[in-house]
Each structure stands twice: as structure tokens, then as C-alpha cells.
Amino acid sequence: MEPEEYEKLARVEREHWFYRGKREIVRYWIRQTLPLQADSLLVDCGAGTGLFAREMTKDCRVLATDDHEDSLRLLRERLGPDRVLNASCVELPLPNATVDCLTALDVLEHVADDRSAVAEFARVLKPGGVAVVTVPAMQLLWSDWDRVLHHFRRYDRPALQILFDPVHFEILHLNYINVLALPAILLTRKLRVLFPTRKSGGRLEEFIPPSILNGFLRQSFVSLACQRFLRFPAGVGLLAVARRRDSSIPQQ
């Protein structure tokens, strides 16, 4: 991302319905699939500003990785240098089978070779370890937001599923998320094409809505993402939860 994007994110992510809701959703799926102990190791790949990683330090040992200096500066401030690794998610400086839980929250879309990144997740995860991944969905939603954030792609369900080699991963959950916001976001993104936002005006993602609306959006986002029964055909994002199989460790 551009340096100013980290500053914008840091200003709103604590309370903004999307960022706060995403952290709640990921914690829910971790609890459902892999109860963490104090000595469990969670690695947050592409940790950004480090807010999620810092919140998880209450539950387990945490390492945050990123390879952008603006992110690394924020991570070291929030977590301390001993909890931060300067590393790409396609080449993690960690031994085989040493990680209990790995998170990559809106990260794979930034990686040119996303298949190699997921193979690296398989290498470092212990057998029985869990990866929780979120990505932006639906190429139809591609906009200036994706370009500013240096995305290579948006995903559909098959494109995300195929990254998780069934030899090494069992997919426990895969579903579209942020479903109710899809019509409004689709309309907004298409209007941007017709009426580009002036540079001074900012984007909707940079502002926290009024409290009641912000709370409603967060609650609807979280409740629909934290269930197993409804399989949605579309959404603004995708969530995958995958368990590392007890098989040979892939070599990079």
C-alpha cells in the first residue's frame, strides 16, 4: 500500500464496522476450530498496522510479519521488535511445522504468486494447525480502491479454494462474507467510475459512519459470517478456514 494508506487505516480501524467486524469474525473462527493456549504460536502474515496481532497477544504467543517499512514501523511500535519479522508471506523465516495458527487478512490479493504463499502457509503450520484467510471478492467490484491498495486481483470461491492443495489442507469453512453490504458497495464502486472522487474528497472506507449505522453494519457483517448453514452465492469478501493435514511437509 501507499504510505498514507497505513495512516488512514490506523485512524479508523479500531471502530469502523468493517475492520472491527473482520477481527471479530477471525477470532470466532479461530475459537471454533483451534482453541489457543498461552504457549500456542499465531503468525499474522501481512499484519498491516498490527491491531489484530496486538489483540491476539492476550490469548497466545504472536509473531507479526510484513515486508513494507511503513507497516513494520507501526508493528514495532504496537508489538515490540521481538514480535515482528520483516518477511514476505511467500518466504517466512520460520522452521517447518512450528505454527499453530496462521492468519492472512486481506493479504493474498497483494501477492503476485498467491499459490506459493499458501504453500508456504502449509510448510510452517503444524499438522492440525489452522489457517484463516480473508480476501476481497468479485472482480465485478474492482475499483480505484483496489488500485490504490496495489491489489493483483479479487477472488471468487473456486479461485480461493484451488489455492489450498487438498493433499496438505482440509477446508473447514469457505464462504462469502460482507453480504448485506454488497448492493450498496457495488453501486458506490460503479458510480466512482462515472464520477471519480476528487483527491481531496476521500473515499467512504476512510470514514466511520454514525454510531447506530456503524453498529448495525458491524453486527450484520459478523452474524452472517459466523455461521455454517447459509452458503452465499456472492459477497464483498471471502473467508477460508483450512486445517493442515497430517501429511508430509511441502518443501519450497
Image (cartoon, rainbow, N blue to C red):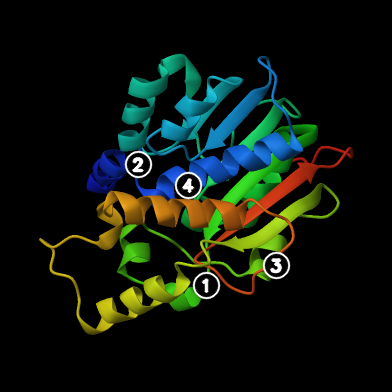
Mark number displayed over residue 157: none
The residue depicted at 70 percent of the width and 58 percent of the height is: 174
Q: In this view, does 169 lie above or below 61?
A: below
Q: Is mark 1 on a helix, strand or loop?
A: loop
Q: In this view, does 209 lie above or below 235?
A: above
Count up the numbered dots. Answer: 4
Q: Mark 4 points at which residue?
A: 21
Q: Quadrant of residue 6?
A: top left
Q: Are marks 1 and 2 in contact (CB under 8 Å)?
A: no
Q: Earlier in the sequence, mark 3 or mark 4?
A: 4
Q: Is residue 225 left or right of residue 193?
A: right
**Mark 1 or mark 2: which is in front?**
2
Q: Earlier in the sequence, mark 3 or mark 1?
A: 1
**Mark 4 or mark 1: which is in front?**
4
Residue 108 percent coordinates (x, y): 54, 53
Q: Residues within 10 Å of mark 2 (few under 14, many from 20)?
A: some
Q: Mark 1 points at which residue?
A: 138
At label 3, the amino acid type is: Arg
Q: Do the residues labelled 3 and 2 touch (CB within 8 Å)?
A: no
Instruction: Measure the C-alpha gap from mark 4 to mark 1.
Output: 20 Å
Q: Name the residue under label 2.
A: 15
Q: Is residue 23 left or right of residue 196?
A: right
Q: Name the residue under label 3.
A: 231
Q: Say if residue 26 shows up in the picture.
A: yes
Q: In this view, does 82 lie above or below 175?
A: above
Residue 250 percent coordinates (x, y): 79, 42
Q: Which of marks 1 and 2 is nearer the N terminus?
A: 2
